[in-house]
Image (spheres, rainbow, N blue to C red):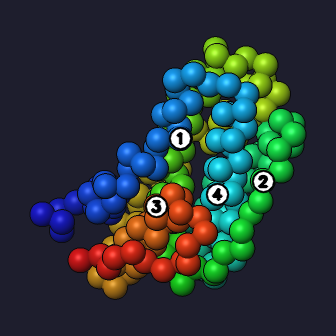
Amino acid sequence: MRDSLTMLERLDVETKVHHGPADSARVALLGNPTRQRYTDYLARVYAFEAPAEWRWIRTAGLDSVIDLAPRLFAPKLAEDLATLGRFPDVFPALAFKGIAHALGWLYVVERGRLMNSMLHRHLVRRLPFESSIAGSYLAGSGSLGLRWQQLGAALDDIAHNPTMTTQVINGALEAFRLMRHPHQPHTPVQKAA
């Protein structure tokens, strides 16, 4: 069965147990958003995504596999946070082990951004002032149809090599684990089958 799945589908299956916890902060903002909750949420996203973006840029050959420029939103996040008076800590991260490892992380970050358009529309209604002055990350990163397609194609291209497939899956598992526990060492929690 796994052989008939696209890599995006396979990653969804292999990482399914992490989806609920990873989405919980976004879902919580759909409830009763406040300026403080929104600011805390953006700070948490920045602390996870900014180092990942830095690592993508420094991964040799990744830019020849996938266009990175439309996936870099840390500057918008930083601007939104500065407008809200928050300057989060960013912890240093180890380099990716290669293109496949970086693509696993890319899947996790882009998957999380799938909800950003809906979240932005909700916050425009519930926190109109904050959304107008500090909503560029959510407004800009949520439109990802083409980015998602390109990621799927890059993942399928790399999936012809079983070792690379394992590295992609392990990268995604590592990213999900570190999203929840950012101060733990960067090692995979389990090996992909």
The mark nearer the N terminus, 3 or 4, is: 4
The mark nearer the N terminus, 2 or 3, is: 2
Left or right of 162? Residue 61 is right
Q: Quadrant of the N terminus?
A: bottom left
Q: Is residue 105 above or below residue 44?
A: below
The Cα–Cα distance between marks 4 and 2, rounded to whole angstroms, is: 12 Å
Q: Nearer the viewer, mark 4 or mark 2?
A: 2
Residue type indicated by callout 1: Ala
The Cα–Cα distance between marks 2 and 1, rounded to whole angstroms, is: 17 Å
The mark nearer the N terminus, 3 or 1, is: 1
Asked if the residues shown at circle 4 and circle 1 are in contact, with their CB atoms under 8 angstroms apart, the answer is: no
The mark nearer the N terminus, 4 or 1, is: 1
Instruction: Tell me the residue that label 2 is attached to.
Output: 88
Q: Secondary structure at mark 1?
A: helix
Instruction: Report the front residue among 142 and 157.
Output: 142
- Residue 26 x/y as whole percent: 53, 37
Instruction: Tell me the residue that label 4 is attached to.
Output: 49
Asked if the residues shown at circle 2 and circle 1 are in contact, with their CB atoms under 8 angstroms apart, the answer is: no
Instruction: Report the front residue among 130 and 58.
Output: 130
Instruction: Tell me the residue that label 1 is attached to.
Output: 25
The mark nearer the N terminus, 2 or 1, is: 1
Residue at point 79%, 39% (across, down): 80
Residue at point 34%, 85% (across, down): 163
The Cα–Cα distance between marks 2 and 3, rounded to whole angstroms, is: 20 Å
Residue type indicated by callout 2: Pro
The Cα–Cα distance between marks 3 and 1, rounded to whole angstroms, is: 13 Å
Q: Residues within 10 Å of mark 2 (few under 14, many from 20)?
A: some
Give the numbered dot on residue 176.
3
The Cα–Cα distance between marks 3 and 4, rounded to whole angstroms, is: 12 Å
Residue at point 31%, 55% (across, down): 17
- Residue 176 x/y as whole percent: 46, 61
